[in-house]
Image (cartoon, grey):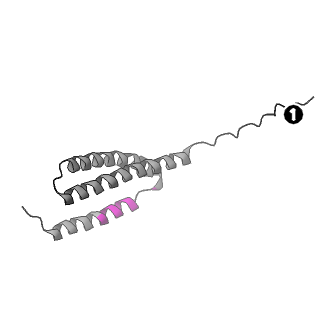
Amino acid sequence: MSVDILSLVTVFVLAAFVGFEVISKVPSTLHTPLMSGTNAIHGIILAGSMLVLASASGTLQLALGFVAVILATLNVVGGFVVTDRMLEMFAGKRPAPRKTEEAGGEKA
């Protein structure tokens, strides 16, 4: 069963347009919860890409599977880094550490 390359490209382009439109309408206050959800999805994508790589047989399949695992790993790690940075924005200010007097400069 062969799939027409034009059909695959059409689905990819439509998915890119729909994804861009959906993400551009999200308010900034919802980005942190959405990033947490997408990190879980990307973890599933990473597991799937490792399963596909394990069943690869040819050189091209191995190379593409390896690239898929690397990109999925970068996506997961990058998502957690971005989520951590966004959560730091909502953290409260920490008090400045108090300066202690030096041991040799005691006041009389």
Residue 105 drawn at (x, y percent) = 87, 33
Residue 104 drawn at (x, y percent) = 85, 32
Q: Nearer the viewer, residue 8 or 102?
A: 102
Q: Nearer the viewer, residue 107 or 30?
A: 107
Name the residue rendered at 21%, 65% in the picture: 11
Residue 64 drawn at (x, y percent) = 24, 58
Task: Point out the residue furthest to the left here.
Answer: 1
Tell me the element at label 1: loop
Name the residue rendered at 30%, 64% in the picture: 16
Q: Mark 1 — residue? A: 105
Name the residue rendered at 37%, 47% in the picture: 39
Is 62 one of the magenta-colored residues?
no
**Badge 1: how crowded within 10 Å, few (<14), some, or many (20+)?**
few
Say whether residue 98 is left or right of residue 108: left
Q: Main secondary structure of the magenta part?
A: helix
Would you say residue 30 is visible in this rendering? no
Q: Amino acid at mark 1?
A: Gly
91 to 100, vertically: above or below: below
Specify start and end residues of the magenta stretch as a single range: 16-27
Is 19 one of the magenta-colored residues?
yes
Residue 72 drawn at (x, y percent) = 33, 52
83 to 100, vertically: above or below: below
Say whether residue 4 is left or right of residue 93: left
